[in-house]
């Protein structure tokens, strides 16, 4: 009788240990190995519908970030042609979002961004176009997303201009992950798609999106 109880208890403990190890093993392998480059700093912009768009709107989502301007006739059409392919692949994912910032806010008004979004055939739940103060937009590009060298900044913001073909990838917790992806290069865009899938399968860490830089 004592042996039966012992074996029963032993078996129960064994099963519990198995499930605990399985949980942590699965959790470990669900985490993407993409390195963390930076954190998204707080911001407040305006989207193509004239509504506020802030860092909290990215919370819990895997986001791709770019900078462009609507009248660009060189790299921007190539970039956004490739971005549209990314959008088409992930537009049915609830936790996916593309954030396209204008780098020419003095020209790209809300109505112009709205018209551009309609031309791209984008769903505003998964692809937003934002404008705001030029210095804030440029600061985010250089010091949050790392898609332009901070050394490129000039003293007079009116004389400053960003024209970057790079995309950045942000995880659900506000960490900028991986490297920068050249939006004009097919191989980089395919790598971006693979990395998006990895982050979509990654478990979200506890805490708020803004918690990573609130201290």
Image: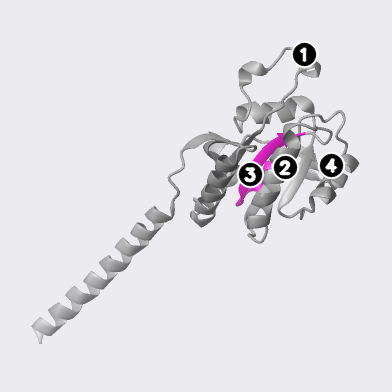
Q: Quadrant of residue 106?
A: top right
Relative image position of residue 184 (x, y in whole percent):
65, 37
Q: Vertical placement of 116 versus 16: above or below?
A: above
Q: Residues within 10 Å of mark 4 (few under 14, many from 20)?
A: many
Dot label at residue 96: none
The residue at which mark 2 appears reads as 80
Q: Residue at x 66, y 32 (%)?
A: 165
Q: Residues within 10 Å of mark 2 (few under 14, many from 20)?
A: many
The residue at which mark 3 appears reads as 64
Compared across the picture, whether 189 is left or right of 66 comes to left
Stretch in magenta: 55-68
Q: Nearer the viewer, mark 1 or mark 3?
A: 3
Relative image position of residue 35 (x, y in whole percent):
46, 38
Compared across the picture, whether 18 is left or right of 198 comes to left
Q: Is residue 30 magenta?
A: no
Q: Earlier in the sequence, mark 2 or mark 4?
A: 2
Relative image position of residue 21 (x, y in whole percent):
30, 61
């Amino acid at each position: 009788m004592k042996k039966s109880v012992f074996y029963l208890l032993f078996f129960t403990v064994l099963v519990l240990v198995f499930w605990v190890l399985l949980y942590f093993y699965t959790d470990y392998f669900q985490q993407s190995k993409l390195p963390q480059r930076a954190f998204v700093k707080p911001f407040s912009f305006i989207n193509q519908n004239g509504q506020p768009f802030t860092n909290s709107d990215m919370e819990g989502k895997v986001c791709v970030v770019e900078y462009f301007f609507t009248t660009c006739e060189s790299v921007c059409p190539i970039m956004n042609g490739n971005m549209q392919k990314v959008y088409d692949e992930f537009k049915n994912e609830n936790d996916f979002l593309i954030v396209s910032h204008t780098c020419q806010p003095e020209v790209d008004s809300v109505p112009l961004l709205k018209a551009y979004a309609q031309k791209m055939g984008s769903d505003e739940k998964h692809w937003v176009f934002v404008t705001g103060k030029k210095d804030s937009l440029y600061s985010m590009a250089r010091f949050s997303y790392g898609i332009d060298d901070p050394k490129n900044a000039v003293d007079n913001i009116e004389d400053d201009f960003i024209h970057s073909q790079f995309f950045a990838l942000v995880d659900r917790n506000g960490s900028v992950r991986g490297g920068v992806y050249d939006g004009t290069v097919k191989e980089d865009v395919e790598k971006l798609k693979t990395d998006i899938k990895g982050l979509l399968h990654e478990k979200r860490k506890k805490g708020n999106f803004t918690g990573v830089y609130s201290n």
